[in-house]
Image (cartoon, rainbow, N blue to C red):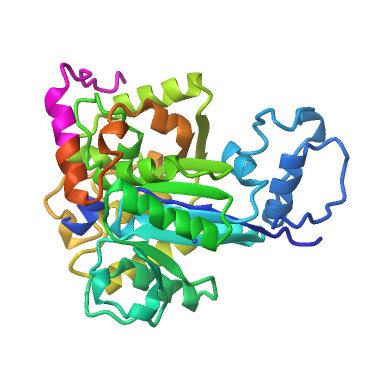
Amino acid sequence: MAAVVFTVVVIVASSGCMDRLGAGLSPGRRRGPPRIDKHAQTFFRGVADHGAVMNPTAQPSDPGTPSLAVPPLFAALAPARSILIAGAGGGFDVYAGLPLAFALWRGGAQVHLASLSFSELELIDREAWVAEHVAAVQPDTASPDWYFPERTLARWLAAQQLPSTVYAFPPLGVQPLRAAYRHLVEHLDVDAVVLVDGGTDVLLRGDESDLGTPVEDITSLAAVAALEVPVKLVTSLGFGIDAYDGVNHVQVLENLAALDRDGGYLGALSIPGSSREAALYRDAVADAQAATPDRPSIVQGQIAAATSGAFGDVRFSRRTRGGDLFVNPLMAIYFTVDLDKLAARCLYLDHIENTIGRRQVITRIQAFRDELLSARVPRAFPH
């Protein structure tokens, strides 16, 4: 069976503040019943070596109809020729996109990785810059900064013989970040972008009881929302992690329900703990923790622990000593939404539209919150 080749770009967003302070569909042939729709064919060609089994009589006749047999996340990406997966929240957030990237690479996809960086990018060599505000970080990219998740990831990817360029953006306002993304989309001929959030604050609309650490996530959302790319998605990994920053996850679920009513929710997809994707992800996170022992990612550490079946107040770093973590299986689930529909529901996206610097974004979000007449009342899970 011929391998399916397509290019995918996925964008990752996550709770970077906690971590810092805390990148052409060639149709293969599959012998089988002709009643399988084209999305199912594309997806199952990519996962057939996992032993996927399906009943052709259960497939919908309309290729655009969602099916339980084909995760909507993969169905949405099936037509893409080039996919960008980016960590929108900064720091190690790009790691939250790795399980998805591994699955796509294994299926023959062309995937690129990008990250909104908290590193001192101005210290790296000029040759690494492919455009203003866009650095192509390689395993051998030199920098005196001890905190350099993008290079750490590039080195780990190279050791696995996987594509090892990780594109990095400095923390910016919406306008320059959008220009940086636009250059990368054109440079890589991207037709699908996936923003990945390590956590859930990217899913908040602005009137919740607390917004967590939204600055980088929402800047990335606003930057990509105005791009003309056929497929734009946001996927969140690490449900519950942002409780550390005050996020009420009943309100997150309420937002997902509203997006579902709008046709913007693509469902939830669990990462099987015994899968190759989970094993590789855990190895990448362990490598990152070893490379940055003084500031390992609490976000990725919890997600990695969740994929191994850990539960409760798990200790995996000195940074979590004395805390009260609640690692659980929900942290190992991708919650995916349509990016444009998510952006349309954000109450303050227009407030940050014309920003140039990160400080402007912070100030305008705070001004919006100060002027908010009433916030939604937080609720506890009823059971």
Residue 308 appears in the figure: no
Q: What percent of the width, then of the height, locates residue 255?
A: 37, 25
Q: Is residue 109 magenta?
A: no
Q: Magenta span covers which residues?
A: 365-383
Q: Is residue 307 above or below residue 36?
A: below
Quadrant of residue 327 in the image?
top left
Task: Pick whichever, 334 or 167, lies toward us.
Answer: 167
Which residue is at a point 26% across and 28% down the rendered structure image? 206
Which residue is at a point 29% across and 52% down the rendered structure image? 299
Q: Is residue 379 magenta?
A: yes
Q: Is residue 128 above or below residue 343?
A: below
Q: What percent of the width, then of the height, locates residue 235?
A: 45, 42
Q: Is residue 160 above or below residue 99?
A: below
Q: What percent of the width, then of the height, locates residue 330?
A: 39, 39
**Residue 216 located left or right of residue 131:** left
Task: Pick whichever, 38 or 47, lies toward us.
Answer: 38
Q: What percent of the width, then of the height, locates residue 357?
A: 22, 51
Which residue is at a point 25% across and 50% down the rendered structure image? 356
**Residue 85 located left or right of residue 209:** right
